Image: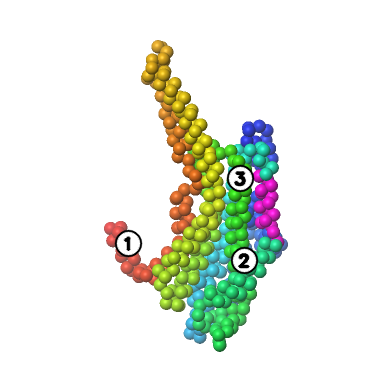
Amino acid sequence: MSTATRAADGGLFSPAPPDFSLVLGGPLYQLLRGTGLAGDTLQLLHRRVIVLSLVAWAPLLALSALDGYLWGSRVALPFLRDIEMHVRLLVALPLLIVAELIVHRRMRLVVAQFIDRGLISQDARARFEAIIASAVRLRNSITAELLLIAFVYVVGVGFIWRNLGALDGTNWYGVATSGAWQPSRAGWWLGAVSLPLFQFLLLRWYFRLFIWARFLWQVSRLGLQLQPMHPDRCGGLGFLAGTSYAFSPVLLAQGSLVAGYCANQIFYAGAKLLDFKMDVIGVVAVMVFAVLGPLLVFSAPLADAKRRGTREYGTLAQRYVREFDEKWLRGRAPADEPFVGSADIQSLADLGNSFEVVKGMRLVPFTTQAVVQLAAITVAPVVPLTLTMISLEELLGRLVKIVI
């Protein structure tokens, strides 16, 4: 269906809701457009990935080389051996940028589905459009992005990284002398540009997830016209399950951060992979909930639709079964109507199948499979670290034994 969509009551065509994108706005988006790193609809993806990654990573390479911390034994952790930083800036950062284009393309279609499927009544249409406008204003908020930047510098870099994130000892980004932290030249760029850039992009995604959750919560309160007989077994909301996969690059980026941190601790601090078992489980649980949790706001409307459908279709089934019984078991069928081949039998079976669809309605618009798949995406970057617990030869040997 085009930009004009048919009203829920099947009447005249009505204009589509305002075009909504979760990512197509905000001061940084305007800056990228102004500098030629993005088009109006986030074109030039490869240019953004290359330029932003180089701005974050290449100066660190050059300054580390000037300081003599690129490779060798002058410091405990030279730049080229810092797995966590390379993963952060060359893997996770590009993934966060790629995710913008994917989410932009998917979410616009998802929002339109609320209208195209007749889930929003004509009476609630104005409120629906007001919800979209509110989400757009929040997405474009200059104040919100300034607060994120302030948080990054004050908390993300000023406290967390300096006190909790850095490895102990002398590293390419600085040394600890007399209890004070002295950044190297590369360390100054890391703290002033690279880490703030990355942390801002990551926090902005968390902010977007908040906007999306808020949007869904407000929509769930509009009195959606859910259909218990819908074959997706979600009253017509089954399309929302597919939106979760649009956030897969964000989950993969988060998993990469965990993997990079674990790798540094394992190779340079003597830790074991199992030491981070609860950390990995916690990150997976939080990220999967961040993506699928907002969909739980539809549980109450779905439960109401299921109860209504069970009652209404149960009543219809009772009426049909009674009339079927009276007609074919109590001898009230016309004498010239054959029982074999009667459409009544097929109708009875169809009614039974319909009632099973209503009874099988899910109370959440996603499946267990979606939970497992998103968890697998998040934890996938950590899987190669299992080789630190078992040699590659031993692992291959076990796999061969299993296959054979």
319 and 237: which is toward the camera: 319
Mark 3 highlights which residue? 221
**Residue type at tag 2:** Phe
Task: Report the Cα–Cα distance between label 1 and label 2.
Answer: 42 Å
Residue designated by label 1: 399
Q: Which mark is residue 200?
A: 2
Q: Earlier in the sequence, mark 3 or mark 1?
A: 3
Which callout, 1 or 2, points at the residue further toward the start of the chain? 2
Residue 154 visible in the current orientation: yes
Residue extending furthest toward the top: 335
Q: Disc 3 marks which amino acid?
A: Arg
**Dominant SS type (magenta):** helix
Q: How many marks?
A: 3
Q: Is residue 335 magenta?
A: no
Front residue of 81 and 310: 310
Q: Residues within 10 Å of mark 2 (few under 14, many from 20)?
A: many
User: Label 1 is placed on what type of residue?
Assistant: Leu
Looking at the image, which residue is at 52% across and 71% down? 86
Give percent across and percent down for residue 189. 62, 76
- Are the residues at dot 1 and dot 2 in contact (C-beta closer than 8 Å)? no
Mark nearest the camera among 1 and 2 is 2
Position of 34 compared to 94: left or right?
Answer: right
Rendering coords of residue 19 (x, y %): 67, 48
Magenta-tinted stretch = 128-142
Identify the residue shown where x is 55% and y is 52%.
Answer: 294
